Amino acid sequence: AQACLDACLSYTSERKQFGSKLSEFQLIRQMITNMMAGTRAARLLCLNAGRLRSKGEPEAVFETSIAKYFASITANKCASDAVQIHGANGCGSEYPVQRYYRDAKIMEIIEGSTQLQQVTIAAYGYQQHGM
């Protein structure tokens, strides 16, 4: 997600359309904002999960599932938006976002798929409510 954000910040600061830099368009700024917020939130969730794990806290498993789930979804959204922002350039090898897009999809599959994380998270939620 961070690499996608960095690539988009660079690209939109340089690329012009209709006489203006892409960074001046409101929709681009909204997409950048969403990337920034999602990336920051994913990073904080991962740091918290790691902190709990290193302390041996029992809720570390749940927090790790939340972090993995959110981070992989965020990476995919950022990668998809990065390709969109780059337009046709996002599909070629000149810019790295096409690789980020492929790599992000893997994150939803390895080390516990997104669906497996959902099952784990929901089970923990029900357990906390005595069910």
Image (cartoon, grey):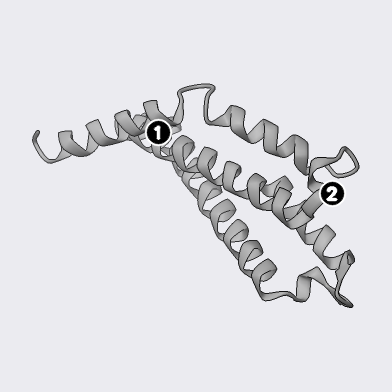
What residue did someone put label 2 on? 89
Residue found at x 91% / y 42%: 94
Q: Quadrant of residue 35?
A: bottom right
Query: Can residue 57 be seen by looking at this rendering?
Result: no
Q: Earlier in the sequence, mark 1 or mark 2?
A: 1
Q: Is there a contact, CB below 8 Å, between mark 1 and mark 2?
A: no
Disc 2 crowd rating (10 Å Cα; few below 14, some 14-19, many 20+) is: some
Q: Which mark is residue 65?
A: 1
The location of residue 52, given as percent across then percent down, is 40, 37
The location of residue 125, given as percent across then percent down, is 22, 39
Q: CA distance from mark 1 to mark 2?
A: 34 Å
Query: Can residue 29 be seen by looking at this rendering?
Result: yes
Of labels 1 and 2, the one closer to you? 2
The location of residue 83, given as percent across then percent down, is 72, 48
The location of residue 48, given as percent across then percent down, is 45, 44
Residue 103 relative to residue 50: left or right: right
Residue 32 relative to residue 11: left or right: left
Residue found at x 77% / y 61%: 9
Q: Amino acid at mark 2?
A: Asn
